[in-house]
Image (cartoon, rainbow, N blue to C red):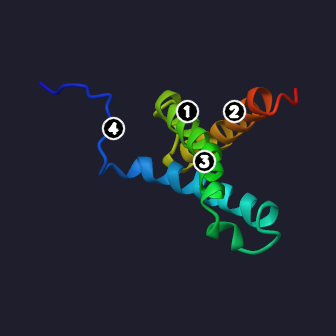
Amino acid sequence: MTSLSLSPRINDIRWYVPLLISALITGFLFFIDEGYYSFEWMSKPANWVAFGIYSLPMFFFQGLALVFLPKKLSLSSRYLLAALIGIGLALFILFKFLFQIF
């Protein structure tokens, strides 16, 4: 009999893909916005705090989407949908509550 474990293992590769996607997208946004097309933003510690504020919600919502997307989809489709859903939700929530744009 196998037990169902909902807690992710740190060596489970499926959690690295959403983390990489959120870090790459946030890094690109910081490259064009904070660094003015350079990587000078990395030298300021306050920018790393903002980097975490943007990338962690993206990672969280991508992981949440991965858990709830149907398993019958191919793995690449699940990652693509999770990225679109997770990044969209994270940016909507950040803009809605943090910046009060909507």
- Measured as percent of width and height from the top left, residue 3 is found at 19, 25
Please state which amino acid type lies under the numbered disc 2: Leu
Q: Quadrant of the C terminus?
A: top right
Q: Nearer the viewer, mark 4 or mark 3?
A: 3
83 versus 26 height, above or below: above
Residue 81 location (% of width, % of height) = 63, 41
**Mark 2 or 4 closer to N-term?**
4
Label 3 to label 2, Cα distance in Å?
A: 12 Å
Q: Are marks 4 and 3 in contact (CB under 8 Å)?
A: no
CB within 8 Å, label 1 to label 3: no
Which mark identifies residue 23?
none
Cα–Cα span, label 4 and label 3? 19 Å
What residue sits right under mark 3 in the picture? 55
Tell which tag, 1 or 4, sits nearer the viewer.
4
Q: Say which of 53 and 24 sits in front.
A: 53
Q: Which secondary structure lies at badge 1?
A: helix
Q: Is 31 situated above or below 50?
A: below
Judged left or right of residue 74, residue 2 is left
Residue to which mark 4 is pinned? 8
Residue bearing the label numbered 2 = 89
Of the residues tagged 1 and 3, which is closer to the observer? 3
Dot 4 amino acid type: Pro
State the separation of the CA atoms marked 1 and 2.
Answer: 10 Å
Could you tell which of marks 1 and 4 lies nearer the N-terminus?
4
**Mark 1 or mark 3, earlier in chain:** 3
Other residues around mark 4 within 10 Å, as few (<14) / some (14–19) / many (≥20): few
SS at circle 4: loop
